[in-house]
């Protein structure tokens, strides 16, 4: 049976298959399927032909008008197993053409490949995979993989997740060198919540809402005190965590020595620490005790008690001397609230997540 199917449109939404499918063949007779494809499916005629004795021309047997048959007369056409198989293969080919190409106006030739005859090599495997996906077989490919090689499916899924995170990690690194404002970073972390997932007191963190209000009518609506992120730790019982985002170029220390070996801390750092402390206090005393917060959060086993606060600010490359390093580290270690983490430290934690995932997927 030919692997090339030629069609010619004969009307609106209908095309004739110009070469008949041979179902069975003997020396002087054969059975063929003359097919047409249309918007709703496939139709056709099964025709018995005979060969002219002096040539290779095949002539259809004289058609019998069934209306001329008597009351007790009938027509029987024997179709053997091989012919039925070839008829099935012909219908499958036409069904694939309909599914992938539809009814195209004019004359067209379609190559229908028998999968048993396909030879996959390193050079053509990518092209075959791409063709399968472009033809709309992505779900079938995936389901077949799940059935035949579930461990490979897991590896492929993990590889895709890791590749996506690696792209985000690369964007994170490049963004550290740009002068982006706070709103950029708020959007970036809101879109990539997994970055907060490891390393912060060794607890997983999930986002409840961004731009929360810690006092007022609703922590997702209007209110007086506003923060960047309201997160929760992940366990059977969860606790709220408040996060404030500043900028990588926010000054951690000033280029002004206060006393020997001690440098003045950046004003934005001091203000942000106070802001987080006040937000945590307001959320604990007011926001978390509102009925809506209890219904929304405690119903999900998320509770608030002296909430943790995290401040993301600055970059350690500002600390270009031992005294500056000591001044900043001494200050943040002395704080009970908030936990201060620099942008490059957060980047390194995100980098660990990606690299650790790669190791586990191997």
Image: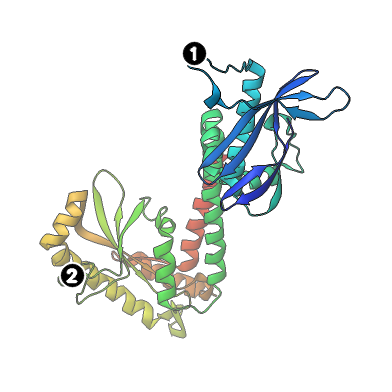
Left or right of residue 268: residue 256: right
Instruction: Sort mark 1 into few (<14), some (14-19) or many (20+) by Cα contacts within 10 Å.
Output: few
The image quarter containing residue 57 is top right
Task: Name the residue located 51 percent from the left edge and 18 percent from the top edge.
Answer: 70
Q: Nearer the viewer, residue 105 or 166?
A: 105
Task: Name the residue located 49 percent from the left edge and 74 percent from the top edge.
Answer: 323
Place of residue 352 in the rendered image (x, y in percent of width and height, measured from the top left): 51, 53
The image quarter containing residue 312 is bottom left
Of marks 2 and 1, the one in the foreground: 1
- 61 shown above or below 168: above
Place of residue 315 in the rendered image (x, y in percent of width and height, measured from the top left): 49, 72
**Which residue is labeled 1 in the image?**
72
Which residue in the rendered view is the most extreme toward the top? 72
- 337 shown above or below 253: above
Place of residue 52 in the rendered image (x, y in percent of width and height, measured from the top left): 82, 25
Q: Nearer the viewer, residue 82 or 131?
A: 82
Which label number is shown at residue 318? none
Left or right of residue 297: residue 195: right
Q: Quadrant of the N terminus?
A: top right
Give the mark nearer the N terminus: 2 vs 1.
1
Circle 1 — which element? loop
Left or right of residue 249: residue 21: right
Q: Nearer the viewer, residue 170 or 217?
A: 217
**Which residue is labeled 2 in the image?**
282
User: Tell me, what colour scheme is on the image?
Assistant: rainbow
Place of residue 114 in the rendered image (x, y in percent of width and height, measured from the top left): 69, 32
């Amino acid at each position: 049976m030919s692997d090339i199917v030629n069609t010619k449109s004969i009307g609106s939404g209908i095309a004739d298959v110009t070469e008949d499918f041979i179902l069975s063949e003997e020396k002087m007779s054969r059975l063929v399927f003359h097919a047409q494809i249309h918007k709703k499916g496939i139709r056709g005629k099964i025709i018995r032909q005979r060969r002219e004795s002096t040539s290779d021309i095949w002539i259809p047997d004289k058609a019998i008008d069934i209306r001329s048959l008597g009351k007790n007369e009938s027509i029987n056409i024997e179709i053997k197993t091989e012919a039925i198989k070839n008829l099935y293969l012909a219908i499958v080919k036409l069904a694939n053409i309909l599914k992938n190409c539809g009814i195209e106006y004019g004359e067209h030739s379609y190559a229908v490949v028998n999968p048993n005859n396909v030879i996959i090599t390193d050079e053509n495997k990518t092209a075959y995979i791409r063709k399968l996906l472009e033809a709309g077989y992505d779900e079938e490919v995936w389901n077949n993989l799940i059935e035949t090689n579930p461990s490979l499916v897991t590896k492929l899924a993990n590889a895709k997740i890791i590749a996506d995170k690696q792209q985000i990690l690369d964007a994170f690194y490049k963004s550290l060198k740009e002068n982006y404002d706070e709103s950029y970073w708020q959007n970036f972390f809101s879109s990539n919540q997994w970055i907060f997932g490891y390393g912060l007191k060794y607890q997983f963190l999930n986002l409840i809402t961004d731009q929360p209000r810690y006092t007022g009518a609703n922590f997702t609506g209007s209110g007086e005190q506003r923060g960047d992120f309201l997160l929760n730790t992940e366990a059977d019982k969860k606790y709220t965590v408040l996060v404030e985002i500043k900028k990588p170029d926010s000054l951690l220390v000033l280029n002004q020595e206060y006393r020997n070996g001690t440098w003045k801390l950046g004003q934005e750092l001091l203000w942000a620490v106070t802001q987080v402390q006040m937000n945590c206090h307001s959320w604990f005393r007011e926001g978390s005790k509102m009925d809506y917060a209890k219904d929304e959060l405690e119903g999900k086993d998320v509770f608030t008690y002296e909430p943790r606060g995290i401040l993301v600010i600055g970059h350690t490359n500002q600390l270009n001397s031992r005294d500056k390093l000591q001044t900043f580290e001494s200050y943040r270690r002395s704080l009970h609230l908030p936990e201060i983490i620099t942008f490059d430290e957060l980047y390194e934690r995100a980098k660990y997540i990606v690299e650790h995932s790669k190791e586990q997927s191997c």
